[in-house]
Amino acid sequence: MTRLIVAAGGGGDAVAAAMLHTALYGDGDQAVILTYAWDRLLIDPVPGPRGAHDFTGLEPLTPAVWKVPGEARPIAPAGSTLPRLAAELPHTIALIDPRHGAEGVTRQLEDLVTHLRPTSIDLLDVGGDVLARGDEPTLKSPLGDSLTLAACCQVNAPVRLLVAGPGLDGELSHEDLRGILGPVVHTFTAADTEPISQVLEWHPSEATGMLAAAARGVRGTCEVRDAGLPIPLTDESPTLHEVDLDEAVSRNELARALMSTTTLDEAEALSREICGFSEIDYERNKALWLKEQRPAKLNAESVLPRLAQFEAEARSRGVTHTTFRRLTEVLNLSGYQRDGLRQLLIASSPEQYAAPLWSLKQ
């Protein structure tokens, strides 16, 4: 049997898809995880999602869809977590290429359904921003999720929409989502995180990292992103909800507008019109800013005093945990120094490592 899991926003949604598969379906069959190659600038300095032309070593999975094997490589200067993810997970990683808008993504989905005849199709979003109306002031990255939602509702096959960790992406709070979330399908446990435990050691996703930490029992307030957004980790954080697909589309104005788009530029223009911004514009601007920055030195003498100052200030804000992405940026380090920072901090204070988060000294 083959399960098809569509990672709504790419990034950490693909990692969570592997956790979902273990929790709901066990190890008796494998999944095809369809996902964007759209990593944060810490990993990929090129703004926007990568297409098939941005890789070497891809393999045809169907006439319209490319498989990302562990041996694939992004073409410099682009970066991608997908090849390493493919090498470390037992599932097939397939690439969503959004260059031809929602119509193109729909064709890719239809091609997969025709060729794979999957036992089930799940559209998975961590956090719940796939359910945004488009006018929420906290919304940051609606484009990818809305494209996949627009495509999934046009496929001639049953698709189940699942939201994991409501509120964990920091775009819509759990209170914002409470009225539309359907029944709890599952509550993730520490055992569910085991298949992705090694991936979480290096993957930069904050939302999926918090989902796994919550499944392992971590509670408190986690500060994330360059803006220092506080995210509550509660007993609701490790839950998985089913949501009515039609209701989600009716709520998501951008998804409805995107359905007939045939280019990514067209989709991006609609995001600016409906939501007031495009996250690719944000990435373009931040990429220019990052080019002008000079990263700090990565050594204990430079890092640990500044870390102590940050921890003291964060505790005064009620923060109990943070992510290594947040620490990388607040300590003025580059994305390439993230793993080195993580190793340095864990070696210096192993008791503060609440995998995959960093617990602040109390």
Image (spheres, rainbow, N blue to C red):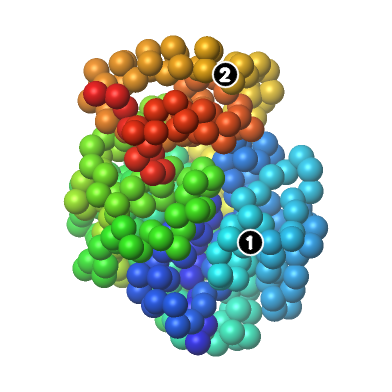
| Residue at the spot 65% in from the left edge and 41% down from the top edge | 44
- Name which residue type carries label 1: Ala
Front residue of this view, candidates 56 and 312: 312
> Across the whole image, how many numbered discs are drawn on residues?
2
Percent of width and height locating residue 235: 19, 51
Percent of width and height locating residue 182: 23, 66
Left or right, 329 with reference to 163: right
Crowding at dot 2, Cα within 10 Å, few <14 / some 14-19 / many 20+, comes out as few
Q: Secondary structure at mark 1?
A: helix
* Residue that numbered label 1 is attached to: 87
Q: Give the spatial CA distance, label 1 vs label 2.
A: 31 Å
Left or right, 189 with reference to 334: left
Percent of width and height locating residue 332: 54, 19
Q: Secondary structure at mark 2?
A: loop
Res. 356 image quadrant: top left
- Name which residue type carries label 2: Asn
Front residue of this view, candidates 95 and 317: 317
Q: Is residue 292 visible?
A: yes
Whether 175 is drawn above or below 293: the answer is: below
| Residue at the spot 44% in from the left edge and 12% down from the top edge | 305
Q: Is residue 252 visible?
A: no
Front residue of this view, candidates 147 and 97: 97
| Residue at the spot 74% in from the left edge and 73% down from the top edge | 60
Ranked by sequence position, the earlier of labels 1 and 2 is 1
Q: Are marks 1 and 2 in contact (CB under 8 Å)?
A: no
Percent of width and height locating residue 29: 48, 82
Left or right, 100 with reference to 160: right
Res. 299 mark: 2
Q: Nearer the viewer, mark 1 or mark 2?
A: 2
Crowding at dot 1, Cα within 10 Å, few <14 / some 14-19 / many 20+, comes out as some
